[in-house]
Amino acid sequence: MKKCLLVVVFLAFTLTWGSSAWAEVIKITVDARGGEAETTRVTIFNDAVEALNKQLKEEGSDIQVKLQKNFFVGDRTDHMQRFILASKAGVAPDIFEENHDLFAILAKAGYVIPLDDYVEKYWKGVYDDFYAGLWASAKYAGKTWTIPQDSTAAVIYFNKTVLKKLGWDEKRINKMVEDVEKGTFTLQDMGLLAKEAVDKGAAKSGIYHRPSHGGWYQVIYLDQGGKLQDPVSGKLVLDKSSSLAQLQFYYDLVHTWKVTPKGMTSMDWRVIRQNFLQGDALFWLYGSWEWGGLPRSGYYVGDRKVDEDFMWENIGFMLVPAPKKGGTPATLSQPFSHGISSSSKYPEIAFRLVTFASSPELVARHAILTGHLAVRKASTEVPMYKNDKFTTEVTKMLKYTNTLPNHPLWGKYRDLIYQSVQAVEVGGLKPAEALEWLVDQMKTTLKDEVEIVE
Amino acid sequence: MWGRDNSFLLHTLKILLWKSGLMGKTLPKNQRVSPEWRLHLGIRAKNLYVYSPFLGPFFFLVVAFFFVPVILIAVISFTSMDAGLQWNFVKLAQYQKLFTDRILFRVLQNTLIYVSCTLITSVGSGFLIALLTTYLTENENIGVFFRAIWLLPRITPTVVYALLILWILDPTESGLLNTYTKALFNAPSQDWVLNYPMVVIIWLSTLTGASYAVVIFSSSLKAVPRDYIWAAAVDGASRLKIIYYILMPILKWPIMFMTIWQTLSLFTTYELIFLVTDGGPFFKSETWSLYAYHKAFRYFEFGYGAAIGMGLVAMGIVVSLLLWKVFGFKKMMEPSKGGV
């Protein structure tokens, strides 16, 4: 009797707990980068791994996935460097998240694997729902290397408090936004309005832009009609006339209209944000994700905490105005994407984890909490996303969007553009001189991989 | 244990312990090393084995972390290594690029200005401070106190030092320096780092360089026999004349050491410039070593960055030989012809 009881207990124990004890637990590491408010890049994988483990059990698999999350707050170049060194040592994270334009370097060097087979395998019900235009950002040399996690839009934020000091009301502010879309409010108009604000003492600065290296400078170049990549040859392109117009714009900001501090390219991020929020600057050319990030970053204006209500009351946003009357405004999207490391022992498991993290609800949650845009249509039906006014408005801007090129030398191209902007803002060069410098550097640095067109 | 047929190392150790007196002065006859062995061991041990247990670890560190990297960098400079970390040999292509890189000319200019100005100010001010706190200050405690204050920039971690300086030079009205200039001169706020990047990095490097020079020169001044100074004073020499005619010639070796050491150090310094100005704005404060760093670690052009680094090695050798000539190194190495 006792023996029978023992056997029964043992069998019950084995069936309930023992089965999982015999399961193979594999560790999948996801590594992402972002601002302090963007941790959902990795935290959404908590839900994803639960769903994956559940599916694996249902399939009868012995595999269970244990997740390790790494979140890096810092420069993308440093983040990529860490990944490269880890790849060389064979200890790279399975899933690596970065701006899409960095993956061309990683793909060329063999640190990430092409995903075409997996995308095809899991296409139905998941990847067929992604916005078609985003797949261009995932491709390099004819293959798919990444899965977009979110998208963005370059916007011009404006401080309503400053406009109200100039005597503007809500109606006039809304009209400005409409006029930008119609093409009747141009870059020149924006510059002159900023000058008026500074001259009348409504703001200390008229226009801020990002201080550090980044592809966002190119939104003005694209706005001027410039192309970044030849779709046929895949080579990078420098359009001299658009580039000159871009440099002239940045030169005018500092020297002609005097609406941008000369030291803009060395300003501190927190100083920029604080200054803008408290009305020291009228316009700020930056990215849509700041809308979600600012309320979570602990800023105060006077005694008032900057939260979502503060943002709607005091801050507005619009497209980047057209360069000329009747032209088309512009914006720029730079998707943040997942790649699978070539040193991953379980690439398909890692890919399935990414697939679960790309569910409509998780995509919507990440997008809303970080001020990004969803990459798939189903997410726009998720109540959290549907009811978010900012995301809905910005999503409408995407019809004017462009994306950055995927090219291994894009980083050098981008940094030369940044240096040319510095050249006109603080380097003492006139726009034509800076263009000459830029063309010379492009030819020297990028050689055959860049086409210089008039 | 002490027999003749024991290992070399044991024998060497035994001699060292015996000579040091730790073993005691005499050993039993059957445990003593024979005179021939003693001589043999003494010579060999003195030449190599005596020092190897002590110098070995440090020798290994220098070889592993200095010579091996230099050789690796030299080899990498002949490749087009990038983010892929592939060894693609391209012969002299990277060195040819050095001569066509227009930014490099500006960088070389900046480097020469930075090194020469910082050298003069750091060695000069270090010497001056050493004189003030050692020779011209009677109270040793006061001298020690001020020398200790001057050591602060050197002992502060570079990142902390850079952050403090950036706060002092903050371009807003709240920046410490702007607060003082406004209060004293009613001057408007300045973006010091943006407007005077080279002046800022020269000043910061002077503060750290001077502190080391103070230590070296202070010790050297203390080692100067007081008789010379008293004799000169008795003969009616003023303090300035004593400094110029007696102290400076005696301190030629430390001055030469500090000049060469500081020069080579300044050629290779980049972390402070990286943290404060990052070589900007628009290459106005970009130095050679920082440019090599940017090329290698920002743009992943490891091959080209290595070639720039090798250019630095060549510059260092040329400058060292030049300074040895200027200081009359050969003459200084000759035995003195009597007197001081």
Image (spheres, rainbow, N blue to C red):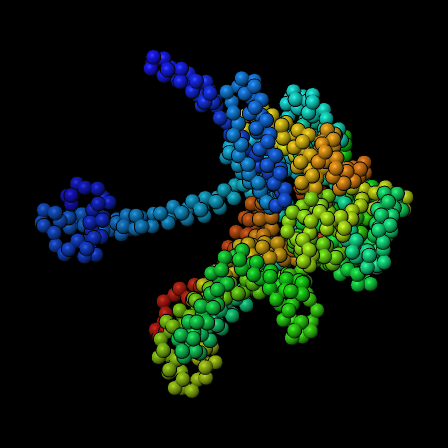
Q: x, y percentage for residue A18? A: 44, 21
Is A339 on the left-hand or right-hand side of A90? right
Q: x, y percentage for residue A366? A: 66, 37
Q: x, y percentage for residue A138? A: 69, 31
Which image quarter holds the N terminus of chain A?
top left
Residue A241 visible within the image: no
Q: x, y percentage for residue B152? A: 48, 64
Foreground pick, A347 / A293: A293
Which image quarter holds the C terminus of chain A?
top right
Quadrant hosting residue A112: top right
Residue B71 visible within the image: yes
Numbered disc total = 0
Residue drawn at point x = 54 percent, y = 62 percent: B205
Q: Is residue A224 above or below residue B289?
A: above
Residue drawn at point x = 63 percent, y = 42 percent: A38
Foreground pick, B152 / B128: B152
Residue drawn at point x = 67 percent, y = 36 percent: A365
Is B241 on the left-hand or right-hand side of B198? left
Foreground pick, A166 / A248: A166
Q: Is residue A342 above or below residue B317?
A: above
Q: Is residue A429 above or below residue A11?
A: below
Q: Residue furthest front?
A: A1
Residue drawn at point x = 40 percent, y = 69 percent: B220
